[in-house]
Structures are given as structure tokens and as C-alpha cells.
Amino acid sequence: MSQAPLTHARPLRSTVTGAIRGAIRVPGDKSISHRSLMLGAIAVGETAIHGLLEGEDVLHTAAAMRLLGAWAERDEAGVWRVRGVGLGALQEPAQVLDMGNSGTAARLLMGLVAAHPITCVFTGDASLNKRPMARVTKPLEEMGARFVGRSGGRLPLTVVGSDQLVPVTYRLPVASAQVKSAIILAGLNTAGATTVIETEPTRDHTELMLRHFGATVTTERLEDGALAVTVTGQPELTGRTIHVPADPSSAAFPAVAALLRPGSELVLNDVGMNPRRTGLYDTLVEMGADIAFENRRDQAGEPVADLRVRHSRLKGVVVPADRAPSMIDEYPVLAAAAACAEGDTVMLGLKELRVKESDRLAMVAEGLTRCGVSVEVGADDSLTVHGTGKPPKGGATVATAMDHRIAMSFLVLGMATEEPVSVDDGAFIETSFPGFVGLMNGLGAAIVEA
């Protein structure tokens, strides 16, 4: 199953609404969906994936795994089935691997193919081709892979892989689950033990899923407090059944909408509650959000819960820098909540936002300013939002720079502002949250074509 990339801009306008009410399940977790396709493709036997996110980003990953020799299709029941080729047996693709808008897919797959004796060319859309890849290519080059790309290691980029890579011990210079995962995936087909040291804990979906498939992955706390994640190379991975939880990053948008609208009560089912992904929810609770975490349970090694969210009066807080890895994708929608909160919300340590799908720090600050919110961007890559306890004026059209999370965040803000908020392009929302507009309108929102 594949889907052509979106090419036409889709301006959208969001207006103030009544209460947000209902019970929904947002689409599957994007991070887990990417990894389940990749690991299923190098496992022996069949992997059955329930609840796979069928957004543009993940469909590009599925297409890439087919080009690399695996079989990956959706059955009539909606279950994705992947028949793997076994570790080390990926085939050289006859075509360029187009990763669309997904930095996660591009970086992780570079690590996976780097440990195979094949040559692959990666490309993406205009946004992805601007994003830096040197943070991934540097440690992979230390292991023995070769790369030819544009300045900064940007796409389009050619990977010349090898099945004779050498294991490394690599300390991450920045907190990045993508870089960590790329090295671990390269270490899978590398003899010996490959170790990644992270000063700040990042998403551990790769480690959890590798253990589920049969790999040996250990995590050790070092004397300086850092975590050493080690994978033992050349295991035999066996196809598994995977239940993908609802994406906590996607759930953030209806959750914040419900917090901002009086009379709202919303239930979000099966939301992933991996503690390295829940920074936003921790922050919202600190701000006074009424969020109940019900029916906590595990699904294929990942904790999940049902979230009951009720309208709340929010107050400003200081969000510490060490929380950033657990909520790096949620700062734009947190900023929307902060714009309606009482007092200052100070978000520290946001440097990584500058190299996402857009310079999210600059885009959020500019969009909030257009909507009548007072903000400050610090020289230390902090963002301060001065809330008045009332919804801001709105009445602006916000540029999205092809960034799905910027678009959704300002559409959520428009549900509370005095005047409508428009975004110049909502087409890229489909990369991570297919059906967003229809789902939100079904809960009581009013998002229309602008």
C-alpha cells in the first residue's frame, strides 16, 4: 500500500468552538510504527502489526522496506503483515529511497542499511532535504560505512554500506533517539558489542522493540549518571505480533483543545505512556490540567493508558531543559496552551527545535506574536510565553513551513482565540495524523478550508 505525496497547499481556518467532547483513539504511534516495519523486515518469519499509523511518513517507510526486499502489505482486516528477509539480507534497491517528510525514517534506515554490503540513495521532500544528517553519518562512518551527500550531510545522500563494520562506543553530543537508534541498528549486523552513551535519556522504543524481537540489548547506568545502551551484534530476530499504541504526540492536540474549551470532557483511548514520551502531560498537570490516567496496562512491552481530559484553568510554569527529550515534538502545542494560561511559561533547552521539520522555535514565536501573544526567545534557545489567563486575540494567518505540528498547534489555538486563526498549509498534517480535521470537527471543533 502506498500513497502519493501531497503537493498542493491546503490553507485551513480554525474558529472558536463550544466544548470538545467525546471518546476517540488517535492514530498509532509514529515512532513505533516506523520501527516495527524496519525490524519486521530484517526478522525471520512474519510480523503482524496492529494499529500501524497509516500516515504519509510511515507509508514511505513501508515502501522503502519493499524496495529493500521485504514483503509488507495491509490485509483486509487492517493488519499490516511484514515477511522479513533475515538480518544481513537486505537487497540493494533498484530505486532511490524516498523518505518523504520523515527524519526518523531517514536516519534510522541509514543506520540499518549501513551494515549491509549495498549502496542506497536517500532523498525526501523539500523540508527533509534541508535537515542535517551529519549527526548520523559521523558515527556510522566511524564504524566503516561511507556517505556521499550535500554539505552538512544533507539529502539527497548515498550510503555505501558494508557487512564488515566495526563496533564502537559512541557518546551522543546531543540528546537524540534518532542518532542512538541509527547506531544501534547498524550494530545489529556488526560482530561484537556496539554501545551508545547518552547523558540525557531519550526515547527507548528501539531498545524495547529489539528485545521483543529477540535481540540482546542492555542499559547500564554509568558513574557520571549517563546511560550506556549496548546491543550484541548478529542476533537472530524472529517475527512478532505488535500492537501499536495511540501516539501520545498526536493525542496532545485534542487533549490541549479540551483543556482550553469550557465544558469540555474528552477520553483518549490506548495512549502510549512510555515515561520517555510523557513530558508534555507531566507539564500540563503541573500547569493545573485535569487529566486522569485510567486503565493503565502494557501492550507488547509499551505502557498505555486511557486519558480523561477536562477543561482547566492553566497557570504558567518553568519547563526544565532536562525534560526536552521526553517532549521535543510537543513544544508547539504546549506553547498554544501557555498562550491561554495565567502567567509566564518558560521553556528551557529548546535548541533541538531548530533542526526539526522547520525551525520550530522561530516558527512558534512568530506565530504566537501574530496571534497577539507576547513572547521572548532567549539567546540560550529558551522560549517564554507571557499568558494573561485569557485567550489571545488571534485573527492571524500563520506560516507553517511545511511542518505538520506547527499547523495542528495553531489550529488548536484557533479553537480558543477571540478571532479565527488560519494556517497557510495544512496538507502536511497527513504525514503524522491522517484524518485530523475530520476527527477534531467530530469532537466539536470548527476547522474549515480557508
Image (cartoon, rainbow, N blue to C red):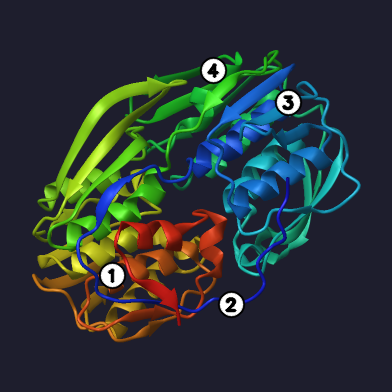
Q: Earlier in the sequence, mark 1 or mark 3?
A: 3
Q: Earlier in the sequence, mark 4 or mark 3?
A: 3
Disc 4 marks which amino acid? Arg
Residue under the point 82% across and 31% down: 90
Question: Could you tell me how far apart the alpha carbons at marks 1 and 3 are, in whole angstroms?
Answer: 42 Å
Q: Position of residue 53 (x, y in %)?
A: 55, 43
Count neighbours of disc 3 (C-alpha within 10 A) and say few if under 14, some if 14 to 19, many if 20 or more.
Answer: many
Disc 1 marks which amino acid? Leu
Pick whichever, 356 or 447, lies toward us: 447
Residue under the point 36% across and 32% down: 274
Q: Earlier in the sequence, mark 2 or mark 4?
A: 2
**Viewer-side label of 2, 3:** 2
Count neighbours of disc 2 (C-alpha within 10 A) and say few if under 14, some if 14 to 19, many if 20 or more.
Answer: few
- From the image, tell me which residue sits under label 2: 9
Question: Could you tell me how far apart the alpha carbons at marks 2 and 3 are, in whole angstroms?
Answer: 37 Å
Residue under the point 55% across and 59% down: 430
Q: Earlier in the sequence, mark 2 or mark 1?
A: 2
- From the image, tell me which residue sits under label 1: 413
Location of residue 9 with respect to 158 vertically, above or below: below
Question: Could you tell me how far apart the alpha carbons at marks 2 and 1 are, in whole angstroms?
Answer: 20 Å
Pick whichever, 104 or 11, lies toward us: 11
Pick whichever, 329 or 74, lies toward us: 74
* Element carrying mark 3: helix
Q: Quadrant of the N terminus?
A: top right
Q: Earlier in the sequence, mark 1 or mark 4?
A: 4
Q: Earlier in the sequence, mark 2 or mark 3?
A: 2
Disc 2 marks which amino acid? Ala
Q: Position of residue 106 (x, y in %)?
A: 66, 49
Q: Position of residue 341 (x, y in %)?
A: 13, 65
- From the image, tell me which residue sits under label 3: 42
Count neighbours of disc 1 (C-alpha within 10 A) and say few if under 14, some if 14 to 19, many if 20 or more.
Answer: many
- From the image, tell me which residue sits under label 4: 211
